[in-house]
Image (cartoon, grey):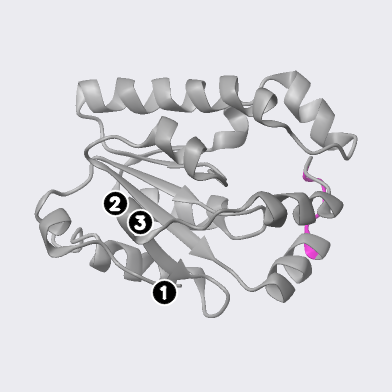
Amino acid sequence: MHFAVTDAERTTKPTIILVMGVSGSGKTTIGGMLAGRLGWEYAEADDFHPESNLEKMRSGQPLTDEDRWPWLQRIADWIDEHLATGTPAVVTCSALKRKYRDVLRRPKVALVYLDVDREVLIRRMAARHGHFFPAKLLESQLDDLEPPEPDEHALCVSASEGPPARTVQKIIEELGLNGD
């Protein structure tokens, strides 16, 4: 499923870009590169987790909705602060379910969904060392994932192949930020 932002949405350039997807989709890599290319502030959603969430994931337990609500609210507050000050930024967040995205959705926030093939995710997760999120939790994220629907106006980008720089360039072009 790949669809882009509408022409009407393209006329309003985002102030915040929310890069979403399951673990291993490349959120940190793409988000960091995107912020660097644009000269925007960057925040990693994992940094918003309370220690109890990190401990739970380290022990191999998937997070519940109850675990995620305070985390999502902290990200939403960060987004609101940046919108209020007009500070452009990129933030990552799995945002697996529509109801999670609803907490984060704002005018001037562009949602970018990194769509990655299951086999690629498994390979990436197996190659990751020292990350708090164990590979065995990937299935729980895939089970919870509700890819954005067309009415959410997300930019859906395949991030399974090619260098991350190509994905970043595509995002910049699709969001109409290549002239900025």
Q: Which residue is mark 2?
A: 38
Is 146 part of what is drawn in magenta? Answer: no
Count of numbered tags: 3
- The Cα–Cα distance between marks 1 and 2, rounded to whole angstroms, is 14 Å
Q: Nearer the viewer, residue 102 or 43?
A: 102
Magenta segment's dominant SS is loop
Report how far apart the C-alphas of labels 1 and 3 lie in the structure. 18 Å
Residue span colored magenta: 127-131
Give the Cα separation between the discs numbered 3 and 2. 19 Å
What kind of residue is marked 2? Leu
What secondary structure is marked by label 1?
Answer: helix
Location of mark 1 (residue): 166
The tag earlier along the polypeptide, 1 or 3, is: 3
Tag 1: amino acid: Arg
Disc 1 or 2, which lies upstream in sequence? 2
Measured as percent of width and height from the top left, residue 118 is found at 70, 71
Residue drawn 26% across the image and 66% down it? 174
Q: Position of residue 143 (x, y in %)?
A: 71, 54
